[in-house]
Image (spheres, helix red, strand yellow):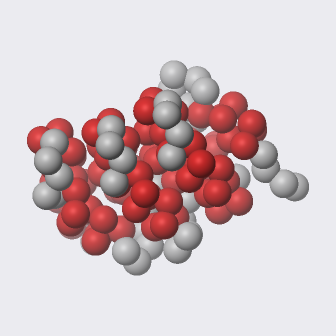
Amino acid sequence: MTITLKQVKNLLSPDEPDYDKAAKIGQEALPHLKKIIKGKNAMMASKAAYLACMIQSKKTIDVISIAAKSLDPIVRVSVAGGSINLHVKGVEKILQSLLKDKDESVRNKAKKTMKDKEKNI
């Protein structure tokens, strides 16, 4: 079954999306999430970034790398927080970059996520 951009947007449209349910779509959603992250709607981009962090795929790193460089700190905070769910090579490098972010809330969230990841090792 092919997933469409509209279907991904519908999964992200509630104020509190069911990320566990949405993540079951898998890596097929990643190109759509990338498109949403690159869009102008920061709230949808932040939800897309968080959802991407729930999808266990090497391809996810490309998507969240873009989100981690977003001009909007809310999107970068979503990556920093959502990365606790991602267990693929490369996520630590992204978190390390977010520890140096110009926005304090991004740095704080990245720091907390790094600590939480270390506890779960």
Looking at the rendered image, the quarter that the C terminus falls into is bottom left
Residue 87 is left or right of residue 17, and the answer is left
Q: Position of residue 34 (x, y in %)?
A: 56, 53
Q: Position of residue 28 (x, y in %)?
A: 71, 59
Tell me which residue sits at (69%, 31%) in the image. Answer: 10
Residue 65 visible: yes
Tell me which residue sits at (43%, 33%) in the image. Answer: 42
Nearest the viewer among 7 and 54 is: 7
Q: Residue furthest top?
A: 15
Nearest the viewer among 67 and 3 is: 67
Q: Position of residue 87 (x, y in %)?
A: 42, 68
Looking at the rendered image, the quarter that the N terminus falls into is bottom right
Q: How many marks?
A: 0
Tell me which residue sits at (66%, 35%) in the image. Answer: 9
Residue 42 higher or lower than 28, as above or below? above
Q: Residue furthest right?
A: 1
Tell me which residue sits at (14%, 47%) in the image. Answer: 102
Residue 98 higher or lower than 9, as above or below? below
Location of residue 91 (image quadrant): bottom left
Location of residue 5 (image quadrant): top right
Residue 97 higher or lower than 54, as above or below? below
Q: Position of residue 17 (x, y in %)?
A: 56, 31
Residue 48 visible: no
